[in-house]
Image: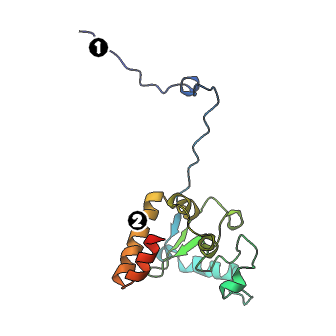
């Protein structure tokens, strides 16, 4: 009986090139969001942070009307609609959604701007929020269930039909 031996080595680049001969572009991988737990920050780190970035009283938009005319990407990272960071209200932990980008490098920095554009696909929402399409779908289902439980049947039927 003859036994075939299979090679366990990786194919070389010429072996995996498409028939057209054009090189295959590398797959762009998103970097995963980074979470900073508040309980992990020492008192010294909190003190240094307060010294480096003291609270200042400066103008910042309060309403959507004031916010719409601000330059983009939005410089107000502490705004709850900003897409760069999320703060968990229960634990106080900070999630940096795009750890590989600076604030001014974001394509979309405001959730209100994205909502104003109108309907977009789960894939596009995932790219904007640095989440997978499946995670966006899970959040959508959970939100629709909460809306239904709150008695929003008319609104939910409107959202589903439109």
Q: Is residue 92 positioned above or below 32 on the image?
A: below
Callout 1: SS: loop
- Disc 2: CA contacts within 10 A as few (<14), some (14-19) or many (>=20): few
**Which callout, 1 or 2, points at the residue further toward the start of the chain?**
1
Q: Residue at x 37, y 20 (%)?
A: 6
Could you say where residue 78 lies in the image, as x and y percent from the top left?
A: 63, 79
Q: Residue at x 73, y 71 (%)?
A: 72
Could you say where residue 26 lies in the image, as x and y percent from the top left?
A: 60, 40
> In the image, 125: left or right of 5?
right
Q: Is residue 56 positioned above or below 109 on the image?
A: below
**How far is the residue under mark 1 from the one under mark 2?**
48 Å
The residue labelled by disc 2 is 138
Residue 140 sits in quarter: bottom left
Q: Residue at x 49, y 79 (%)?
A: 92
Callout 2: SS: helix
Could you say where residue 52 lies in the image, as x and y percent from the top left?
A: 69, 78
Q: Is residue 29 positioned above or below 2 on the image?
A: below
């Amino acid at each position: 009986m003859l036994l075939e031996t299979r090679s366990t080595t990786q194919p070389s680049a010429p072996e995996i090139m498409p028939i057209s001969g054009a090189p295959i572009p590398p797959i762009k991988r998103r970097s995963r969001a980074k979470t900073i737990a508040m309980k992990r920050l020492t008192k010294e780190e909190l003190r240094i942070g307060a010294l480096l970035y003291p609270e200042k009283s400066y103008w910042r938009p309060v309403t959507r009307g004031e916010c719409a005319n601000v330059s983009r990407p939005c410089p107000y990272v502490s705004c709850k609609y900003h897409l760069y960071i999320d703060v968990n209200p229960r634990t106080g932990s900070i999630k940096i959604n795009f750890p590989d980008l600076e604030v001014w490098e974001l394509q979309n920095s405001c959730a209100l701007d994205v909502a104003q554009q109108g309907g977009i696909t789960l894939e596009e929402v995932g790219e904007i929020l640095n989440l997978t399409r499946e995670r966006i779908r899970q959040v959508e289902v959970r939100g629709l269930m909460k809306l239904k439980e709150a008695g929003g049947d008319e609104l939910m039927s409107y959202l589903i039909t439109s």
